[in-house]
Amino acid sequence: MNRFSLSFGETMRAIATDRVAMLSLVGALVLYSFFYPAAYQHQVARDLPLVVVNLDHSSMSRELIRKLDAVQAIHLVGIVESMPAARGVVEAGEAEAVLSIPAGFERDILRGVQGQLALFGNGAVLGRASIAMQGAALAITAFGQEVALQQAQFMGIPASPPLRLIERPLFNTVEGYGSSIVPGVAALIVQQSLLIGVAVMAATRRERYGKLRLSRPGFFGIASAFSMIGMISLLYFSGLIFWFQDYPRAGNLSGLLLAGALFISSVVAFALFCGSFFRTRERAFQLITITSLPLFFLSNLSWPVEATPDILVYAAQLLPSTAGINAVVKLNQMGARLPEVFSELVKLAVLTIFYGSLALWRYRPGPAKHGSYIENRDIETVTMVSDED
């Protein structure tokens, strides 16, 4: 216990005095917690400009225009008298879509004939035009239902529709991109910051003292120090940042603590094992930085597992982020119970044992050169060093 506590304390002091390690484990985490969600602050696209060509000038056409202006996704920028005028508005970049209401629109509806509308989108920016057209289609559908009800009443058919559809999103209540992506990315940010921090510390000590040799109490003291930092980071995201950004929070705290502990343990074990191969701290940044995006896609949170090649699915099971991201999102965002994430918890426990055993083997104490010991107080009070690689 004495060597464990000494190793734990020395590791924390070494991190506190290493500027790069502090930036990786603390500074980058705080920066990304506010910087990354900022891109998805509005969650969904809104107020995309739309122009209307109103050739009917009737009460029904004006009612349709009012419904268009009430839709969140679009913003009515003007009503013009001809298609050439509307085309000029689009070409000037002031509108993404055009709705044309032909002459005789109200007359056709009152006669019981189907009304005709024309909706056009700007293909130059297809994503924005698509959302604007979807918003317009939503308003047109609502208007059409009201008109159909009026026609039914006029013909003497019972007014109450047989069915009424009410949509309620279950987990992503605002149906926003940020609520869907950021919770999973947060777990990946925690993993990558730990990987960089551990690798930088290990590579720095290897540059100074050669290959690191740790006793078991010293190894577990170092692992515990990094695990404590990782757990605080994960709870910082799951508690403070998700509340501050108003992301879904189902509140399965006990499940989150268990899954989070297993996730962080597996990440630290994985980081200690990987860090033993780095000879310089720069290599740690280069390798881990370019792997962040592939690791997120391999977790299959934003890409369906059915569309992923089998070899990548199997390879992804060797990464803590795959099971960790899914477990954390299910527990914290969807309110899953522990039996529903049992497979992820088992995978994390297996990865902890697997990578922990490999890391213990990599840092195993060996015969010291000429039977001497070299003190390395930044990692362990007494560390045996060997020239073997």
Image: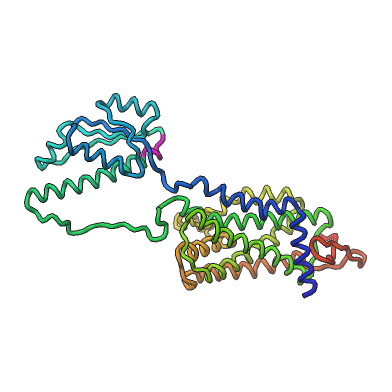
On whether residue 127 falls in the magenta region, the answer is: yes
- On screen, residue 250 versus residue 352, left or right, reads left
Q: Is residue 8 above or below residue 200?
A: below
Residue 272 at what x, y percent from top left?
Answer: 70, 61
As drawn, the residue found furthest toward the bottom would be: 1
Observer-nearest residue: 346 or 155? 155
Give the dominant element type of the magenta stretch: helix, strand or loop.
helix
Quarter of the rendering containing residue 94: top left
Observer-nearest residue: 15 or 384? 15
Residue depicted at 52% across the width and 63% down the height = 328
Observer able to see residue 389: no
Observer able to see residue 255: yes
On whether residue 232 falls in the magenta region, the answer is: no
Instruction: Name the quadrant of the N terminus.
Output: bottom right
- On screen, residue 27 versus residue 84, left or right, reads right
Residue depicted at 36% across the width and 40% down the height = 130
- The magenta segment is 125-129
Instruction: Name the quadrant of the C terminus.
Output: bottom right
Residue 96 at what x, y percent from top left?
Answer: 36, 34
Residue 194 at what x, y percent from top left?
Answer: 66, 58
